[in-house]
Amino acid sequence: MGMTITEKIFAKASGKSKLSPGESVWLNVDVLMTHDVCGPPTVAIWKKEFGDKAKVWDKNKLVIFPDHYIFTKNAQANRNVDILRQFAAEYDLPNYYDVGTDRYKGVCHIALAEEGYNVPGTVLFGTDSHTCTSGAFGMFATGVGNTDAAFILGTGKIWEKVPASMKFTFNGKLPEYLTAKDLILQILGDITTDGATYRAMEFDGEAIESLSMLERMTLTNMAIEAGGMNGIIAVDNVTREYLKEKGIDSYDEFYSDPDAEYFAKYVYDVSRMEPLVAKPHSPDNRDLVKNVSGKKITKAYIGSCTGGKLTDFLFAGKILLGNKVQVPTFIVPASTSVAKQLEEETISGISLKDIFVNAGCFIAESSCAACLGGPSDTIGRSADGDVVVSTTNRNFPGRMGSKKSEVYLASPLTVATSAIKGELTDPREVL
């Protein structure tokens, strides 16, 4: 019996020649990532357990991005960044990207790709559930708790069980009204938020191969919303081209064997799919946009690690060009690099930034911002009674602020279309 791509990466990282789902192994970790929410407690546990002489196992493999609660006057949030700053200075850490400096990058999951930490065939752990985003690069990436992260910080190793794999194949040519967000919402509606618990979610097919790296990252990003341990897409020319631009040309490519065993397989024909939303209050509460069309909204939000990438803004820009938004609409670039691209990328000779400003949108600084609520002064945060349509990844009660608000998750095409109509609207109505 052959192995899946995830099983092969586990075998490489544990020095084994063959592995099967359910086996437990010590993995050698290639990169550990943390941020301002989970970094301070991780460091505290590490110091407590490893003692006064605690050493970081490999400074070059530790990456720290303050990104969650940073553009705020909240004292506790600011203190967390101070703790990271002191930790980075004390241990002379080269990969600390401090806010308020030229090194600041924005949301960790996008910055990992931009800064060249996503390398095929490697193992990346992060103190954030959406660390699975990096799996778009043919690598194993998953989120862990602070205690596990503290153990990695001191040893470079972690004890993990090999996950069973599920395969999701999308056949056909992707229509212009669908995005990766629609594909993952389709899966979530089919298997629910615990349908892939502790399993690897592998994506393939013609429609996946046609996606850019940024769109692929939307798919793997939301693997965790199905309970997935990781999402993964095999390396192809799209991956290789992206890595080449980053100066990365040495890595291991792994592919699932034809006789690899899967827990389950799902096959879709994208030509038969329609734009989707996740209704309140769960990412798997799927419906067709046309079925909820006409529902009045009070806010629109285009941002986050899921929906704040350049491709997301190109989708939105196409809709917003020459139009005005009817509700407060927040544009939150996932990284400082994306923020710069908003000024450089054009549609019909007009920069994305100008398209958004002319449409009446608010453009915020790069960070996680209102995707996970945040302190009361967080831009875009939902208030009581708000009905928000958003490109983010979760819509649990209180996720974007008030527990008395409703959040609909959708593609950037759907969010932008709804913003100019003031109500949930199928993007096919304007495309």
Image (cartoon, rainbow, N blue to C red):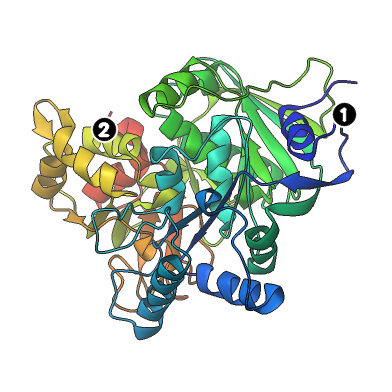
Q: Which mark is residue 163?
A: none
Q: Secondary structure at mark 2?
A: loop
The kind of residue on which mark 1 rests is: Lys
Q: Is residue 55 left or right of residue 431?
A: right
Q: Secondary structure at mark 1?
A: loop
Q: Callout 1 environment at 10 Å: few (<14), some (14 to 19), or many (20+)? A: few
Question: Can you tell which quarter of the image residue 170 is in?
Answer: top right
Which x, y percent locates residue 177?
38, 28
Q: Is residue 221 above or below residue 281?
A: above
Pick whichever, 366 or 307, lies toward us: 366
The kind of residue on which mark 2 rests is: Val
Query: Residue at the spot x=79%, y=15% of the render?
Result: 258
Question: Can you tell which quarter of the image residue 155 is in?
Answer: bottom right
Residue mark closest to the camera, 1 vs 2: 1
Q: Is residue 213 above or below residue 356?
A: above
Q: Is residue 203 visible?
A: yes
Q: Which mark is residue 18?
A: 1
Q: Is residue 265 above or below residue 143?
A: above
Query: Residue at the spot x=13%, y=53% of the render?
Result: 360
Q: Which mark is residue 430?
A: 2
Task: Say whether disc 1 or disc 2 marks the residue closer to the N-terminus.
Answer: 1
- The C terminus: image quadrant: top left
- The N terminus: image quadrant: top right
